[in-house]
Image (cartoon, rainbow, N blue to C red):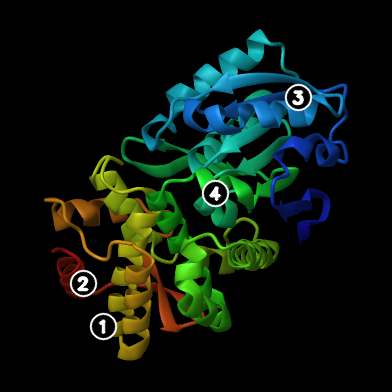
Amino acid sequence: MKIIKVNLKERSYPIYIDYDIIDKIGLYARKKVSTQDKIVIITNPLIGGFYLEKCRIGFEKYGFKTYTIMVPDGEKYKNLDEAVKIYSKLLKIKADRNTTLVALGGGVIGDITGYVAATYLRGIPFIQVPTTLLAQVDSSVGGKVAVNLIEGKNLIGAFYQPILVYIDCNVLNTLAKREICAGMAEVIKYGIIKDRAFFNFIEKNIEKIINLEKKYIEKVVAVSCKIKALVVKNDEKEKGERAILNFGHTIGHALEAETQYKKYIHGEAVAIGMVGAMKLAGGKFFIKKNDTERVVNLLIKAGLPIKINERISISGLLENMKIDKKVSRDIIRFVLTKKIGYVTLNPINDKGLLISVLSELFN
């Protein structure tokens, strides 16, 4: 088992990474939670059908009492209305401050469970058990929890760390290929923003990674978690360096919102956003054309879209970008690549350049 620690003083926690370990989760949870405390597993019917029973048994055979709350599947259910329903169910089972929530699922489940944990009774513990590649390498680590508004993604949320992250790479075998590819967008992102050697490794082994060959996928998950853990340690609440984790997300989040979260799953939108960011960097003369071509070609090999196929307006995308969390004093700021392995946060005042780049993203 690989163990990576997210070092945040009193909020530090371990990330456990291995294969076929869901039914042992209680063994590791006991290091953080008393068996006298309630465990509430929050999941959706799809993931629950595969792993709820294993997870439940994994707690109960180590002495925990478990409860289950089901949330409908899909990004559109990551909202305040659904959070209120979870609060009500927690009250019905008399959940108190010693109750621990368990997010069994992908990014949507992790985000809404973490948000509820951060706000129910002013904060209760929670555990991340991510079941998608994207959640394993990105959203389960770092404590950014949130729900969406109609106006935009993740606008209501908090920085609230889990007490542990428990990653079973074996669960990826039940994922649709589209979900594996979407997760690869975040994996590729880590190479671009922080680790050129990791980017080279992904580039060389992309087919083996997508086919979930054991030693390759385990390395991809572990290295991604290590990079994110380091960035989060240096800047937990996104005052500076942590913003680089949003590479590709400024356009990506706007694209998701503009298409009502119905056309692109998160990693697909981020992939298109990364292409846009590379083109912006090229327009600002930050990056060599060869580096841009390498990124675009790797995204294509990973099965990710690089163009927008929907009939949406550039003005709509721009309006959505104006409520991005990186906006400062009404100026949109983008994470841009100086070279593969190094990025910086840059204000973009040139509206003409931005419109030109967005135009290039349309088929």
Residue 333, horizontal then vertical, whole percent:
38, 67
- Compute the Cα span from label 3 to label 1: 51 Å
Which quadrant of the view contains residue 86?
top right
- Compute the Cα span from label 2 to label 4: 35 Å
**Residue kind at label 2, given as amino acid type:** Val
The disc placed on residue 291 is none
The disc placed on residue 357 is 2
Identify the mark nearer the N-term, 1 or 2: 1
**Residue kind at label 1, given as amino acid type:** Gly
Residue 254 shown left or right of residue 37 in the figure: left
Q: In this rendering, which labeled residue sits more in front, label 3 or label 4?
A: 4
* Towards the viewer: 343 or 318: 343
Identify the mark nearer the N-term, 1 or 4: 4
The answer to the question of whether label 1 and label 4 lie on touching residues, with beta carbons closer than 8 A, is no
Return the residue at label 1: 283
Residue 338, horizontal then vertical, whole percent:
43, 85
Residue 293, horizontal then vertical, whole percent:
31, 83
Q: Residue, x 11% and y 51% (percent of image)? A: 311
Residue 35, horizontal then vertical, whole percent:
87, 26
Q: Residue, x 38% and y 74% (percent of image)? A: 298
* Other-residue count near label 1 (Cα within 10 Å), few / some / many at <14 / 14–19 / ≥20: some
* Other-residue count near label 2 (Cα within 10 Å), few / some / many at <14 / 14–19 / ≥20: some
- Compute the Cα span from label 1 to label 4: 38 Å
Return the residue at label 4: 172
Residue 260 in view: yes
Return the residue at label 3: 99
- Compute the Cα span from label 1 to label 2: 8 Å
Q: Secondary structure at mark 1?
A: helix
